[in-house]
């Protein structure tokens, strides 16, 4: 497996969509490669992880009150 | 001890509206975050959250418990938001093919391997939200549903009425755009 093939399959690897044998070959390549594919794999993986961990909003008390008031009016 | 969602649902169905209020307080932030990200607008997100909880209250007896209550709730919220987006204008269907990465190799930046908790400052959290908000709508919807809400590719395709390959293409493009923006932010000292 070469870098060009790995680059085409980076997202499938991140999503766990590859057959086990292909996943093993890709992971083995990424372990040893110092080329662009390793860079892209690690930076995209980190990007997704950071976004996934980010939970920036809370429910404002005024909105909670509005919702509860609307529920109160329900039959 | 805090009552479980299941207990609060049973109490609500028995006529206790305060129990539903507890469910709103418990799951409100997650639903609001989803609506805000999909709609990109604070006022419309407020309306969508309210409609989501009203719908959930009205059809609570149809919740079977096959999935978590939060999953059921988020599905209602996503449908509500997608309907609102369609009402604004048809969801764009133009695809930009996912570009194969051709950039030359670079040094692996520290942030690519650092623990997430160490990186997530208030400033970075805000930058990440701005980045999601800046994505074109047809990329943003797929990224939010697939990567942030953990829906399956098949479910996202069904909700948006597009093919599975189209979901993948949009998702890969969204991730790459977000990575490029994050790289620029970090390269300019945003991570320090």
Image: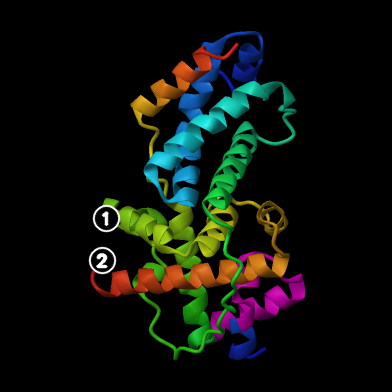
Q: Secondary structure at mark 2?
A: loop
| In the rendered image, the vertical position of residue B6 relative to residue B73, given as above or below | above
Identify the residue at image location x=32%, y=74%.
Answer: B184
Describe residue A38's horizontal placement relative to residue B63 as left or right: left
Residue B182 seen: yes
Q: Nearer the viewer, residue B88 or B80?
A: B88
Q: Secondary structure at mark 1?
A: helix
Of callouts 1 and 2, which one flags the residue occurring earlier in the amino acid sequence?
Answer: 1
Q: Is residue A22 magenta?
A: yes
Q: Nearer the viewer, residue B6 or B94?
A: B94
| In the rendered image, the vertical position of residue B131 relative to residue A74, given as above or below | below
Q: Identify the residue under disc 2.
A: B190
Q: Is residue B127 magenta?
A: no
Find residue B175 and report its horizontal and vertical position in percent: 50, 68
The quadrant where residue B186 appears: bottom left
Q: Nearer the viewer, residue B134 or B180?
A: B134
Q: Nearer the viewer, residue B58 or B167?
A: B58
Q: Identify the residue under disc 1.
A: B123
Residue span colored magenta: A8-32
Q: Quadrant of the C terminus of chain B?
A: bottom left
Find residue B125 and report its horizontal and vertical position in percent: 34, 53
Quick check: do tags 1 and 2 share a chain?
Answer: yes
Describe residue B16's horizontal placement relative to residue A36 as left or right: right
Which SS type dominates the magenta stretch? helix
Find residue A34 and report its horizontal and vertical position in percent: 48, 87
């Amino acid at each position: 497996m070469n870098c060009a093939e790995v680059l085409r399959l980076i997202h499938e690897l991140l999503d766990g969509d590859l057959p086990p044998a292909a996943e093993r070959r890709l992971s083995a390549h990424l372990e040893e490669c110092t080329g662009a594919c390793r860079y892209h794999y690690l930076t995209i993986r980190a990007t997704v992880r950071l976004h996934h961990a980010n939970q920036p909003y809370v429910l404002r008390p005024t909105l909670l009150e509005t919702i509860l008031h609307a529920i109160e009016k329900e039959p | 001890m805090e009552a479980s969602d299941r207990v609060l649902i049973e109490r609500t169905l028995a006529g206790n509206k305060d129990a539903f209020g507890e469910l709103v307080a418990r799951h409100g932030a997650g639903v609001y975050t989803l609506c805000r990200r999909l709609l990109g607008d604070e006022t419309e997100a407020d309306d969508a959250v309210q409609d989501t909880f009203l719908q959930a209250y009205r059809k609570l007896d149809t919740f079977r418990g096959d999935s978590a209550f939060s999953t059921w709730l988020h599905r209602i919220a996503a449908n509500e938001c997608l309907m609102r987006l369609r009402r604004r204008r048809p969801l764009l269907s133009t695809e930009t093919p996912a570009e194969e990465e051709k950039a030359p190799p670079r040094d692996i930046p520290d942030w690519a391997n650092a623990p997430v908790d160490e990186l997530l400052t208030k400033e970075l959290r805000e930058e990440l939200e701005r980045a999601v908000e800046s994505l074109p709508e047809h990329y943003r919807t797929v990224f939010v549903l697939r990567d942030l809400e953990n829906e399956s590719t098949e479910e996202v395709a069904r909700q948006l009425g597009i093919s599975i390959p189209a979901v993948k293409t949009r998702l890969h493009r969204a991730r790459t755009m977000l990575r490029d923006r994050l790289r620029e932010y970090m390269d300019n000292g945003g991570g320090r």
